[in-house]
RNA sequence: GUGGGUGUAGUUCAAUGGCAGAGCACUGGAUUGUGGUUCCAGGCGUUGUGGGUUCGAGCCCCAUCACCCACCCCA
């Protein structure tokens, strides 16, 4: 083999396409039941869109973006996430002025240059929801409810919702300072990664996996104590709406979003059985993003989930997913004349939407029967010299082995009813 | 970007430095037109790739690529 698939990517082969189709269909159905409409944006955008919105020094921008120049020297990037493009489309198409098209969902591939691992790929598929245009805490709960309804529709059991509020920009800033204050005395004892985090993203100090760093966490200040009046009230309301919707959650002050544009509500869905990459979806409110990329100041909230991790979680719980479709009918024709007489039947079946199979390379009767069997078709239609003379067909049920002779009309009648 | 593990037939896996094998799957057959079970036969291959050590390398060494696991990050 001279050519190989790029690192961190994979092919979805026919035997797996059924389950992908299924999880996408269910997401569509659930999102639409909440009144959300699909939006599809390009897989690449101006690189600056992501640099601005995700934050210049976020990991995504710093080392994970696939950037390229086009023939005229313009700088583009394969999208590493879905929110910024949707917001760009919202602003660019003046969707705020065109009625109520502000409940949006999307699905598609995202790209991040990252070391592949279980549940982590360089091209991966996400689904997401964006609600644009209100700071009402009801919508925070609604967006979370969509994801919960989706997981429920799929039958996923062992999943945990964790929520937090990171406050507005000024709360967050105050909290970062408080954290730095607290951690300053321990700085020499922290792991090298945490020493960096202390400067770049203090709240990441809270979810370090090194044990010697974790001991400081217990007495660290909580973001929730650094929310201003409005932000605290907002978070209280979000929880009230979740409670009223019957959605169970855990408040985890360590929940942090990776991208810079998040404010207030942050949440994550965690499946512990998945190992290191156990977060199957995450999202939050991003009231600052839209004005940041040139729209008028507009609050919004959304989330994104990863299909790969979702499928892993479903498989971990042995939830049955669709496989490949099996033929209903397998046609067996012995001899050239029979073959030609079989074709009208074959095409009529297919015109009625019936999956009917036939293989002209198998010539002997035995080989065709074997092929019919391994195709796992429900029925075989047999046309040999005898039937040809009589002008009828044998319809054989391959499960029960029962068979009967039928005219072409009766045969079609029977199979299409 | 860092660390550990693994690369042999389509697939799952064997082979002390000394002739590359087994199961499953696949294809054909077991006398006239009936599949699954059984039996027989058949291709299974540049041992991931490139170097090196050796009389001799699937096995030892180096490099490289890919996958798996973890760090990091996140979906």
Image: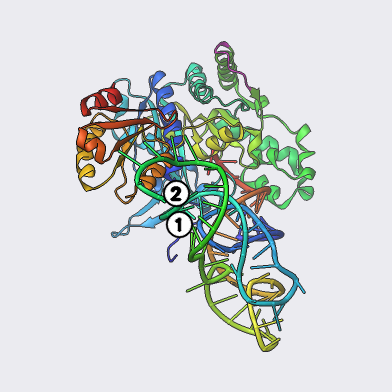
Q: Are marks 2 and 1 in contact (CB under 8 Å)?
A: yes
- Residue nearer the viewer, A205 or A7: A7
In space, the residues marked 2 and 1 are separated at their CA atoms by: 8 Å
* The N terminus of chain A: image quadrant: bottom left
The image shows residue A264 at horizontal and vertical percentages of 55, 27
Where residue A5 is drawn, which disc sits there?
Answer: 1
- Residue nearer the viewer, A233 or B15: B15
- The residue at 48%/22% (across/down) is A146
Q: Residues within 10 Å of mark 2 (few under 14, many from 20)?
A: few
**In magenta segment, residue A17:** no
Dot 1: chain letter: A
* The C terminus of chain A: image quadrant: top left
The image shows residue A330 at horizontal and vertical percentages of 34, 37
Q: Residues within 10 Å of mark 1 (few under 14, many from 20)?
A: few
Q: Is residue B35 above or below residue A231?
A: below
Question: Magenta part mainly helix, strand or loop?
Answer: loop
Residue A22, by quadrant, is top left
Question: Which element is circle 1 on?
Answer: loop
Is residue A37 rendered to the left or right of residue B10? left
The image shows residue A64 at horizontal and vertical percentages of 51, 51
Question: Which element is circle 2 on?
Answer: loop
- The residue at 43%/38% (across/down) is A82
Both labels 2 and 1 in a single chain: yes
Extreme residue in the top direction = A244
The image shows residue A238 at horizontal and vertical percentages of 56, 18
Residue A157, by quadrant, is top right
Residue A185 visible in the snapshot: no
Dot 2: chain letter: A
Q: Which residue is mark 2?
A: A11
- Residue nearer the viewer, A127 or A18: A18
Q: Which residues are magenta?
A: A244-249
């Amino acid at each position: 083999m001279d050519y190989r698939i790029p690192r961190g990517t994979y092919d979805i082969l026919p035997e797996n396409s059924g389950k992908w189709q299924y999880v996408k269909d269910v997401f569509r159905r659930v999102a639409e039941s909440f009144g959300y409409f699909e939006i599809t944006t390009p897989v690449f955008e101006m690189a600056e869109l992501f640099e601005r919105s995700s934050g210049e020094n976020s990991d995504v921008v710093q080392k994970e973006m696939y950037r390229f120049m086009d023939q005229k020297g313009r700088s583009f990037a394969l999208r590493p996430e879905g929110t910024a493009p949707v917001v760009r489309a919202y602003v660019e198409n003046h969707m705020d002025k065109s009625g109520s098209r502000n409940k949006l969902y999307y699905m598609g591939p995202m790209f991040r240059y990252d070391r592949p691992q279980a549940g982590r790929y360089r091209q991966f598929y996400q689904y997401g929801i964006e609600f644009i245009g209100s700071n009402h805490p009801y919508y925070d709960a609604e967006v979370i409810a969509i994801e919960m309804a989706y997981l429920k529709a799929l039958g996923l059991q062992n999943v945990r919702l964790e929520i937090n509020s990171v406050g507005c920009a000024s709360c967050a800033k105050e909290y970062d300072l408080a954290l730095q204050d607290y951690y300053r005395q321990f700085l020499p004892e922290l792991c090298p990664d945490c020493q960096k985090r202390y400067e770049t993203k203090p709240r990441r100090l809270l979810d370090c996996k090194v044990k010697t760093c974790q001991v400081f966490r217990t007495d660290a200040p909580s973001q929730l104590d650094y929310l201003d009046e409005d932000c605290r009230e907002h978070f209280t309301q979000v929880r009230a709406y979740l409670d009223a919707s019957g959605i169970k959650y855990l408040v985890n002050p360590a929940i942090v979003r990776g991208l810079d544009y998040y404010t207030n509500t942050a949440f994550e869905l965690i499946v512990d059985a998945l190992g290191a990459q156990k977060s199957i979806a995450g999202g939050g409110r991003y009231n600052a993003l839209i004005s940041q990329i040139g729209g008028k100041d507009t609050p919004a909230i959304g989330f994104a989930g990863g299909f790969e991790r979702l499928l892993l979680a479903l498989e971990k719980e042995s939830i049955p997913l669709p496989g490949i479709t099996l033929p209903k009918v397998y046609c067996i024709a012995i001899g050239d004349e029979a073959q030609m007489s079989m074709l009208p039947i074959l095409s009529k079946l297919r015109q009625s939407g019936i999956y009917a199979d036939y293989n002209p390379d198998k010539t002997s009767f035995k080989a065709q029967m074997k092929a019919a069997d391994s195709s796992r078709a429900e029925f075989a239609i047999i046309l040999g010299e005898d039937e040809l003379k009589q002008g009828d067909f044998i319809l054989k049920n391959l499960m029960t082995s029962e068979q009967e002779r039928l005219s072409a009309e009766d045969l079609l009648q029977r199979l299409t009813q």
